[in-house]
Image (cartoon, rainbow, N blue to C red):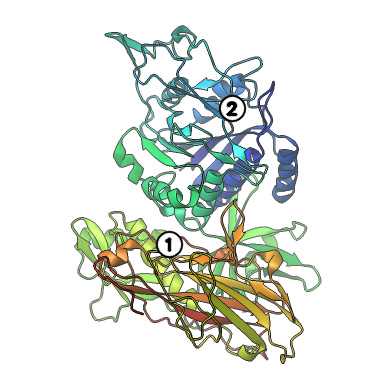
Amino acid sequence: MKNRTLYASLIGINAYESNVPPLYGCIIDILNIDAFLREFCAQQRLLDYQPKYFLSPNENGERAITSYQKTLGKTLDYESPTFNNVTNSAFEHLAKADDDRRDICLFYFSGHGYSSSDIPAEFADRRLETLVLKDSRSTSRDLRDKEMSYLLHRTLKDKPNVHCLVITDCCHGGGVTRGAKTGRRSVNGSDSGAKLEDFLGYSEHFFIKSNGTITFPFADYVHLAACRPEQLAVDTMNGGRFSNALVALLRSGGSICSYRDIIQRLGATVSLNLTSQTPMAVASRDWKLDRSFLGEGLLPYHPSFELHYNSQRRRWQLNAGLIHGLVPSNDLGKTLVQVEWKADAKQSITLEVGEVAMALSVVEGPDLDLLDVANKTYRAILVNLAIQQKKLDCSELDQRSRMSLLETYEAGRYHFVKPIIETSEAWDFKVNLKGNQYELEGFPYLMPRRDASNFMHTVESIGRWDYTLALNSTNSIFREDDFAFRVESVVGGDQKRMHSTDLSDNKILHIRPTQEIKLGYKDGCNPMFRFSISLNRESDLPSCYVAALYFDSLFGIYEKLIKADSQYLEKGDKVFLKYEENLDGSYEDICLEVDDAFGRSGIEEVREYLRILVSTDPIQNLAFFQQKSLTTEEKETMRSSIPAKPGKLRGYERWTAFDFSIRIFRPLPHTNHFNS
């Protein structure tokens, strides 16, 4: 049986010919999505990855490519993104997709976009959206939206089983398939004089005149765009706002989401304060937006860890440990990781996790000899975790729905939740059918799911949230008294000093992990708080490293409140939590929100958790924990956490965690006053 293949044409243009202003983040966009796709495809059982690159870097892009090539360990070959290369070579590459194998093709464009009304009068929409290619304004012209339709139709003709995705991160991108430097990915000038006979596809009779109007067939594909046709897309030195948010979402569980869910989740992340940028998704048929990213039959993306050879100790080590939730193999089972790489063909080995330290694990197995000790690093993904899984009761489902969940579980990698069908077993979660959708009992604010894999992802996220919150060191060198934790409520930017753990009326206090932080909405404003960590004067500790995880009430886990270069804490200094607003800087005011779905379910308050991690060493790989909040029409009832059993610890551990419970009150719409 031949593997399926993902054919990707990836186009990034920083440097343009003529007087077109340069961009700065487009090359980074392409490298980021390429890195994700490489990892994602390597984790699939029968999916190969065949990318083709069309890049035009400037100085910023050259630096990014050089760094990326070092990571890959090989040279990145690419063609120039000229009109001729894109309209021919890029689509010829996608046309290799085989219908019988149910291949996948991806067209990703990051660059300038353009919009004009200079279009043949016979087109009904009277707008022309274009992709501005490297030589568009010198020796060639833009690639027009109607021409994109033709090229996609030609590529996908007679291939109903090929899944095609188009992604455009450019201004006016929402119409392009029918049509720090910080700036907008839009260019002035024009693609003027557009005559119908000059359009690609005209000589092939793609465009049909009827009753004075031009019509043409639509190809079967899904299109994700950075903004609506009338809007502008933001570019920065670190990549496009849309592309950065998309890759972050895919890496934190979004690969299992439908296109409709993806675009809804990106909406809040991408929206700007001053300029509207609303991502959008379109498809030839609306129901196709309910398909999963890159189509069905694919495993969810799992974060990977670095595996390297320690030549001094002559062993293979994983750069993850107890602090990341790993446990050694024990009576509950084996903790296993899978290492995959490509030589002439995809190869993989499965290794067992033996000794586990704070941030380091040793792997064992007879296949270790297959790894090259001269290779700097491999990537390993977790395939089994030796813990007690929470149980999902499926006993009351009909046979077809029950089998669909069980088959999804067996085909995927679910570490924290396991479906059961025996009514005599104690269970942690229970699933019912609501119409033809799976619904989690006791969670009326979570959106029911029609697809079994999406539902299992929902329950797995809750199980993972519980498990991660329960992780801690039971025998640490760090004590609560070593630290001073300071919390301060902020409403409208004004600060008022008060005196208790109730922060609903703007207060500042020193707090211990055993105390609850109470926050509430006031005069319609969201609650905000500031939080800092310092070492007590009486502590014997001269310094340490600190990090943070935030567990929200929709089972999301956020890990960027303390950047890696801000983790070091010395006596006399403070480390503040800071929310990173993607590309717009960071803020010490942490804004919280109670989702509307709680109010619709009659729930006035929710509980969230702030975890402060401390260690003698830098705390790395916290991105492993990151997961997006679940989609609502509903949500939450916190369940008790069952601590993991990491086995015996020798001596004192060099890390620990301090947890702070945050209770947020939001009056229901009918409530006339605030009462905490």
Q: Split into 4 quadrants, where in the image is the C terminus?
A: bottom left
Which mark is drawn over residue 187? 2
Mark 2 residue crowding within 10 angstroms, few (<14) / some (14–19) / many (20+): some
How crowded is the residue under tag 1: few (<14 C-alpha within 10 Å), some, or many (20+)? many
- Looking at the image, which residue sits at the far right? 312
Closer to the camera in the image, 598 or 403: 598
Secondary structure type for disc 1: loop
From the top left corner, tell me how far across and down residue 170 is, in percent: 54, 34
Query: Mark 1 highlights which residue?
Result: 629
Which quadrant, please, contains the N terminus? top left
Disc 1 marks a residue whose amino acid type is Ser
Q: Which one is nearer the viewer's eye here, 290 or 559?
A: 559
Residue in view at x 50 percent, y 72 percent: 385
Q: Hey, what amino acid is under mark 2?
A: Val
Q: CA distance from mark 1 to mark 2?
A: 36 Å
Q: Quadrant of residue 280?
A: top left
Asked whether 519 or 127 is in front, the reply is: 519
Give the residue displayed 67% in from the left and 79% down from the top: 615
Q: Are marks 1 and 2 in contact (CB under 8 Å)?
A: no
- On the image, which quarter does residue 421 sit in? bottom left
Q: In the visual, does 586 lie left or right of 674?
A: right
The label on residue 80 is: none
Of badges 1 and 2, nearer the viewer stands: 2
* Nearer to us in this view, 534 or 178: 534
Q: From the top left corner, tell me how far across and down residue 418 is, in percent.
A: 37, 70
In this view, 458 is above or below 520: above
Q: Position of residue 557 (x, y in %)?
A: 49, 67
- Mark 2 lies on a secondary structure that is loop
Residue 289 visible, this angle: yes
Q: Where residue 72 sits: x, y (%)?
A: 69, 48
Residue occupying the point 38% across, 36% down = 282
